[in-house]
Image (tube, rainbow, N blue to C red):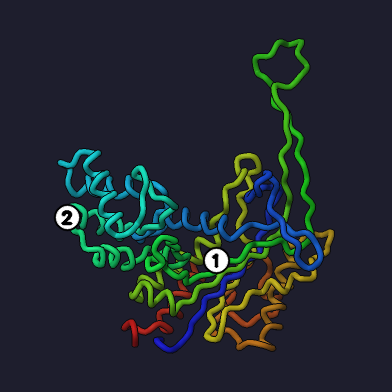
Amino acid sequence: MTNQHLFLDIHAIQTLPPSNINRDDTGSPKTAQYGGVRRARVSSQSWKKAMREYFHKNSAQSNVGVRTLEIVRYIADKIKSYDSSKEDSEAMELAEKVLNEAKVKTKDQRAKALFFLGNTQAEQLAQAAVNGEKDKKQLQEILRDKPAVDIALFGRMVADDPSLNEDASSQVAHAISTHAVQTEFDFYTAVDDLAPEDNAGAGMLGTLEFNSSTLYRYANVAVHELLRQLNNKETVINTLRLFIEAFSNSIPTGKVNSYANQTLPQAIVVNLRTDRPVNLVSAFEEPVKTSNGNVSSSIKKLFNELRKVEKFVNEPEYTFYLTMEDGDNLDVDGVNEENLKTLLEHFTEVTNNLIPAEVGE
């Protein structure tokens, strides 16, 4: 495994009704030009945030990260859990001091920039603060060691000290619609419940922008890099399972109360490759054009592209797929899974055989 590459690719087709889950600075749904037409777009940052929230709510692993300006408060609370005799002001001073000694800059007991810190790293920093540890080398080693699963997957950048950076083992593409879209406007009014009966006017009025789309979504994980970062086979497999589950079941929450766009993917495909990751967005460079719905055509184009790219790259080592369509009619070599649970079980069996028992084997 040391000299062998292993990549996880995950693809999804997911339809969204009228919605605005990811807005630009003017409040409009994000879009992008691709294949000569305007597409709906959801940024990778937006969907990664949704996945991280899924990690927090659904992961059995406790070592999940927090990205915050309130890093001093975060560690101070842990200091008080170790030593309940500490007053809040004293814990805050200790937390800020240990961060500064690790060369993480703060101002007014807040980080100068959003800082990404794992739960285990925060616990160890708090313990070091209580113990009076001042050695910069040891404190920075705490910040590098045992990264949280989301820090390992999505990376950390520290502008003030690049030695604390963590390279991401995963890549998440911006989701785009498989077809052309046009942004629409919802004009709305709100009635004043206590307005006089002879008042025919509205209490307020406004507009909301939205579009409807069927998205192609893609992400990958360099499994060999994740193994180097987490240094534990069981943790790596559990993290990959969580990544697949979160990619499938999470969704950004922008304007969700207005549109209730709580959809799930209509199809997901998971590939394990040993040559390189492959984004299949090229299947939709020519936009889907149909008056009978976009999902079925999008799924067929996705599976056709999976076959076509083998002219350039190797066939995947393993392919697992799950679709709400009739999978037996799709031209694909792979395991047609009954549900996400069985997909994850089969994925675990396969990766358990591919990843050596001893890290570094």
Residue 330 in view, yes or no: yes
Instruction: Using the image, tell me which numbered label, if any, was put on residue 339.
Output: 1
SS of the residue at dot 1?
loop
Estimate the x, y position of residue 78 in percent, counting from the top left.
26, 49
Name the residue: 28% across, 67% down. Answer: 141
Q: Residues within 10 Å of mark 1 (few under 14, many from 20)?
A: few
Vertically, is 253 above or below 153?
Answer: above
Residue drawn at x 40%, y 59% is: 59
- Residue 57 visible at all: no
The amino acid type, in three-letter code, at marker 2 is Gly
On screen, residue 117 versus residue 304, left or right, reads left
Image side of residue 213 versus residue 145, left or right: right
Which residue is at the front of the view, 132 or 66?
Answer: 132
The quadrant where residue 311 appears: bottom right
Q: Earlier in the sequence, mark 2 or mark 1?
A: 2
Quarter residue 84 falls in: top left
Residue occupying the point 69% across, 76% down: 303
Circle 2 is placed at which residue position? 132
Which callout, 2 or 1, points to the residue nearer the camera?
2
Tell which of 37 and 241 is nearer to you.
37
Kind of residue indicated by mark 1: Asn
For numbered disc 2, what is the local secondary structure?
loop
> Disc 2 and disc 1: Cα gap in Å?
52 Å
Could you tell me residue 356's position as x and y percent?
37, 84
Q: Nearer the viewer, residue 290 or 284?
A: 284
In which quadrant will I find the N terminus? bottom left
Left or right for 303, reference 95: right
